[in-house]
Image (cartoon, helix red, strand yellow):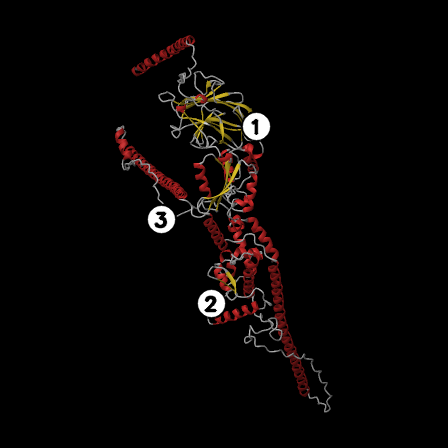
Amino acid sequence: MGNVKRMATPAAKKQKTEEVTPAAETKEVEVKAAEEKKEVPKAPEPPKELEQDAPKASGPKVKDPVAFLTPDTTMNVMNSTGGNILMSLGDGGVRQLLAGARASVGLKSGRYMFEAKIMENTQRAEGQMKSVFKVGFSTAGSSLLMGDCEASVSFDSDGGFVHNKKRTVVGGRFGQGNVVAVLLNLEKGSPNANTVSLFKDGKRVGQPQALPESLVGKTLYPTLTYRNITAHVNFGPEPLKPLPFTCAMVQEAATKDSAVTSYPAPKDGKYEVLFPVALPDQGGFDWLDLFKAKNPDYTELSDRMILEWSDKSGVARNRAVKTSNDKPEMDDLSVRRMLQTLAPLQPRNFIVMEVKGNLIKELRSEALGRFFDVSFKKVGQVLLGEPTSDIKKNTLDLVLKQKQADSDAQFRRQKAEEARKKMIEKRQKELEKAKLKLEKAKKRKLEEVKKAAEKAKAGDKAEEEKKDPEEEKKEEEEGEEAEVEEPAAKEEQPPNVELTAEEKQMVFRKLATSDLTLFTLNTSFAQFSVPSKEEGFDEVRFEWNKEAKAQEYLKKWILDLKQSNRVEDIVPSAWFQGKWAAWQRATTTWNKKQAEYKAKLAKKAADKVARASKKALAEKAAALKAAADLAKMEQAKKDGKEVEEEKKEEQKPEPMEVEEEVEEVKVDFDGVDIFGAKDVDDIGGGMPLYRDFNHEDWSLMSLCFELHLLSHAFKKDCQDADRLGVTLEHLGFYYNKYYKKALVTKAFGAESSQELLGLAKDCVFANKDQVIQSTLDEEMECSQVFVKIVEQARRHRTLLLDTGDTSAQLKILSCDRVCYFPVLDCLKHHHFVEFLLLFVLFTLRK
C-alpha cells in the first residue's frame, strides 16, 4: 500500500501541471500577437549605390566621333550613315547568322558608359531563329560574336551575363523600347573598380559584375551582337536616360583613358583582294591564320569561315564527319552566294581562301570577275615551295601545341582510370570489412544465446551485470583492422612534351582533315597552275619562292602525284569495249566447244558400251538355244524314242547387224607442240587444246587477259604521257572501273595484288615503279595465245604435283564461292541493304 501512495502523488502533480500549461501557452500567444500588430514589417533596403557622380572632365578628349568601322563589323551588318542605327540582312540563310559590331574607341581606364535601344524586332514567325541582342565590351581583334571566347563580356536581353560560353542570370529582361546602358568602371580605388554594370531606362539591373581576369588591364571596346534586331546606339555626349549619378559617355572619354582604332587608308584608294595560291595540305590555312592575326583588317571569304560563323550563331546543321577544309559539308549554300554578292559592294580588304579554286585558271578567272569594281586591287599570293622561317616556326609551335593537348588529354584519361580503379578497390575493401563485421556480430550473438541457455539450464536467476559500454565497443572493434587513412594525393600536372628530331624537321603539319578530298584532288590536280597577270590580276606576289622556283616546284609536285594517285574520272574507250566484247565471245565459244567435245567423247564411249552389250546378249542367247536343243535330244534318248535319221534342215539364225566402229584419228595430246598448234579448237580429230581445262584454268586465263588488256587500255584512255600505267596500289580501283566487278584477290588464293600478279606472270609483271606492264603486244591478231599460255602452265603445274610439290596447286575458287566474299564483307560492316541485294542476285544466279 505504501508503494501505491508514493506513486499516486506524482501522478496528481502531473495532472495539475498539464492543466496549467495550456493557459500559459494561450497567454504567451496573445502577447506575441499584440507585439506583431505593433511591429509593421519593413521591405528590405536595396543595396547602396556605390557609384558616385563623375568629377568634371579636364584635359583633351576623343576628337573623332565614335563609329563602327567596316573591318570591325560582320559582313551582314547594315549601318546607317549618321545615326548609329544597326540592322542586319534578312534574306535566305544569312538571316540566321548573328551580326556583330565593335566601336572605334576603346577604354583602358576611367569610368564610361554607352546606351543601346531596340528599335524593332524583325522576327516575324515562330519558325525563324530567335532574336538575339547582346551589349558589352570586347578586346580589339577578337570575335565580334560575343560570348564564345574569353575576350568579351556581355549582357543579353534575357537577363544573362555571358563570358566564354558561360551564362549567369543577373537581372531582369529588356526588349523593344527599353534604353539599356552599359557602364564600364576601370577607376583605380573605386569600390566598383574593374566591373561592368547594366542599367535599364536609367535604373540599375543587378549588381556590378566583375571583369574576368583575362580582361583586366586590357583596352575594351563597346560591342553589340544581335540577330533579327534593329538597334540604335548612343555613344554620347548626352544619355537618352540619365542614371542616378552622372557618368561620362564614351564620346566624352579622355584621351589618356581611351584608344582609337584606325586602319591605314588603302594604297591608291584601292582595297586589296588576296587570292592565296597554296598546294593542298602545304600550310595554306596556317598561313591564312597567321596573316589574319597580323592584319585584322582583312576579312576571310571561305566555306570554313561560313561554317564557323554558323556554329557561333547556333545554326543547327548536319555535323557529319568533316570531309575537307576547303569545302566542308554545308547544308545551305545561300549564305555563300549572298556573301559573294555582298563582298564587291563593301569597302574592306578580303582574302578569298579557295584551295582548289585558286589553283585552277578557269576558277580563278571566275572569282576575279566578281570583283569588277576598280576600287579593288586583285592580288595573287603564291605560296609554293619552301616556306619562310616565320611560317616554319609557326608550324612547329602548332605541332607542339597539338602534341601537348593530346598528351594532356591522355594524362587526364589515365588519371581518371586510376581514380576509378582506386574507388573500386576501396569499395571492395569496405564490403569485405562490412562482411567480416557482420560475421563477428553473428558469432557474438550466438555465443550470448548459448551462454544464456547454459545459465537458464543451471537455474541461475541472478541478474546479469551490465557490461561497460567501453567494453562492448572494444568487443565490437576487436579483431577489426585499423583503417589507415591514405594521405590526399597531390594534384599532378600533365608532363610537358617536346618535339622529336623528326618532328622538328617537319615543314608542313598533317591535319586530321585534308584540305581536299581524295576524289577532288585526283580529279583536279593535273589542272593546277601558277597565276599570272594575264588572267586579270593587278599583281602576283611570290612570297615563299621566286616565280621560276615556284613553277618548278609545282611541276615536280604534279608529276609525283601522277605516279601515285589514281585517275578518278577515267572512262573506258571504245577500243577497250571492242577488245573486251571479242574476248567474251571467244571464251563463250571455247567453253561451248569444250562441252561439245566432252559430250562427243561421252557419246562414243556410250555407243561402244552399247555395242559390246548387244553382242554379249546375242552370244548368250545363242548359247542358251544350243543348250536347250542338246537337252531336248538327251531327253529323247532317255525316253527310248528313236531319233529320226533325217533331220530337218535347221534354220540358220539371221546374222546380227553390228555397227561398224569408225576408226578415230589418234592424237598424241601430251606430245603436241602447244605453241605450234594452228588452231586451239582442233589439234586433230576435233580435239581442242583446252580439252582438260577446269574452272581454275578458265579463271586464270581470264585473269591473264584482263590484266593484259587493262595495262594497254589505261595508257590509251588516260592520254597523259606522265602517267606510266596502272600501279599495284590502284589495281583494284581500275579493275572495277573497267570490268564493273570487284577484284577479290583471296578468290584466287592470293593475299595481295603482288601475289595475284604472280599467277599471271607469263602475261604481265610489275616493274621497279610498281607499274603493271604486259609482255604481249596490245594489237594481237588472235587471242588464242592465252589458251596456249595457260595450257603450258597447266602441264607444268601437273608435272610439279606429280613430283609431290603441293605448292603448285591452284586455289582459285569457283564463281559461286567468289560471290560469298562481298556478302561477308557487307555483314562485317553492317551493310544489310547491300547484303540483301547480293543475296537476291545470288539466289537468282542459282
The residue furthest bottom is 645
**Quarter of the image that includes the C terminus:** bottom right
Please give left or right for residue 188 compared with residue 815 in the image: left
Mark 3 against mark 2, which lies toward the viewer? Answer: 3
Secondary structure of the residue carrying numbered label 1: loop
Q: What is the spatial separation of the Cα atoms under label 1 and label 2, in whole angstroms? A: 80 Å
Apparent side of residue 442 relative to residue 634 in the rendered image (left or right): left
Gap between marks 1 and 3, in whole Å?
A: 57 Å
- Quarter of the figure with residue 452: top left
- The residue singled out by tag 2 in the image is 806
Secondary structure at badge 2 equals helix
Q: Mark 1 or mark 2: which comes first in sequence?
A: 1
The answer to whether 517 is drawn above or below residue 51 in the figure is: below
- The type of residue carrying mark 2 is Thr
**Which disc, if any, is residue 816?**
none
Pair 1/2: label in front: 1
Image position, residue 474 (x, y; %): 26, 33
Q: Quadrant of residue 790?
A: bottom right
Q: Name the amino acid, label 1.
A: Gln
Q: Residues within 10 Å of mark 1 (few under 14, many from 20)?
A: some
- Badge 1 or badge 3: first in the primary sequence: 1
User: Which is closer to the viewer, label 1 or label 3?
Assistant: 3
- The residue wearing badge 1 is 123
- For disc 3, the neighbor class at 10 Å (few under 14, some 14 to 19, many from 20) is few
Residue located beneath label 3 in the image? 501
Q: How many marks?
A: 3
Front residue of 113 and 324: 113
Task: Say which quarter of the image contains residue 685.
Answer: bottom right
